[in-house]
Amino acid sequence: MNMKTLLGTAAGLMVASGAYAADLPGEAAPTAVDYVKVCDAYGAGFFYIPGTETCLQMSGRVRARIAYSQATTTNGADSLSFKTDARVAFDARTASDLGTVRSFFRVKLDSADGTITADDAFIQVGYLTVGKFGNAYGDVFYGDTGAIYGAFDQSTTGALVMVDKLGGGFYVGAGVQSSHTDATWDNTAAKDKWNSNVWSTGTSAELMYIGRVGIADQSWGKADVSAFYQAFDAANNDVWGVKATADLKLVDKLSARLVGVYEDFDRYNDSYFGAAAALKYQATDALAVYAGIGSAFWDKADTAYKAQIGADYAFTKDLILTAEVNYTSDGGVSGADFGNGTGTGFDDSWSGMLKLTRNW
């Protein structure tokens, strides 16, 4: 037997023994790789969590800014500062006999005070939502600045029923939440947004009742009306308000946002009507310009005004550079402001920023 014959025989024996060993009883078969699959049932960005029927979407943003603020009565010097914030959100949905079961939460990081906080966090089953969520959404300006005082922007724990299959894009909802607020409203320690004690022996229930009706997905845009009543145990602290908003498609590349709001504060024996409007023009695929103006007409203080102008330039779909200038006029230290109606306002002031945003 020559060397070639010997090597060939040895190789054949090795292959045969390997094949035999692979078929021996008790040997585990190789497991199939469970690749991530796209889930198109709930929109873009969802994928199946491997081994489950649950679809998950992860989204977020990072914003870096350089901001200028003019000196005011509460800030005695002009300032220039760097600011950074970020957020990430997780949205998980599963089809069931009860309808879509959804869980959502969002975490935010803010360099201004070095905090990491959780924003909305809730579970939805069909029309029912339980957890922590806002009482109404959508400010009117297109940029960073809020145009309306934020009693409608609270996010607290509670339950909401929202019915959105009424036909024609109409929806209606109602709910109850813990009556979170800060110390300036009820002269007590700030309430817990997550685990509020809404009632105990010898006290009244501190709750916020909310309602909303609207229409969406129209050729002209969308609109809604929301209301809340916020009750506190201490006397003369209740707050209530009603708010109407609209997002309109005016003509090609031009859109508008409108808002009107009325709020009544028992503690201050004061009330105000707020109105604001903003326009946005998509000049090119990359460049959009926007402007807005708002007013707060307090019953017992001077009128406050706020104006904004800005521009967005998209280097890519998700990388946007923003330049923005804001002006606030409120009648000086004895006038009104965009706060809670105490009359301790700010001097007229300017602010501006340059911001880079990365969304995903």
Image (cartoon, grey):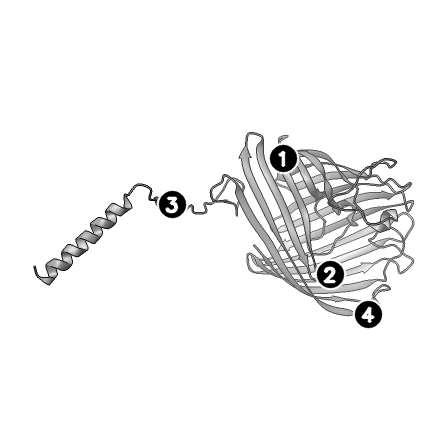
The image's mark for residue 31 is 3
Question: Which residue lies under the disc numbered 1?
Answer: 169
Q: Are marks 2 and 1 in contact (CB under 8 Å)?
A: no
In space, the residues marked 3 and 1 are separated at their CA atoms by: 47 Å
The answer, for residue 320, to whether it is visible in the render is yes
Helix, strand or loop at mark 2: loop
Q: Nearer the viewer, mark 2 or mark 1?
A: 2
Q: Are marks 3 and 1 in contact (CB under 8 Å)?
A: no
Which of the two residues, 200 or 329, is positioned nearer the viewer here? 200
The amino acid sitting under disc 2 is Asp
Q: Residues within 10 Å of mark 2 (few under 14, many from 20)?
A: few
In space, the residues marked 4 and 2 are separated at their CA atoms by: 20 Å
In space, the residues marked 4 and 3 are separated at their CA atoms by: 66 Å
Percent x, y of residue 293: 76, 54
Question: Which residue lies under the disc numbered 4?
Answer: 77
Q: Residues within 10 Å of mark 4 (few under 14, many from 20)?
A: few
Residue at 92% of width from left, 44% of height from top?
269
Q: Going from the N terminus, do you reach mark 2 or mark 1 first?
A: 2
The amino acid sitting under disc 4 is Ala
Q: Nearer the viewer, mark 4 or mark 2?
A: 2
The amino acid sitting under disc 1 is Gly
Q: Are marks 2 and 3 in contact (CB under 8 Å)?
A: no
Residue at 52% of width from left, 40% of height from top?
54
The image's mark for residue 113 is 2
Which of the two residues, 125 or 174, is positioned nearer the viewer here? 125
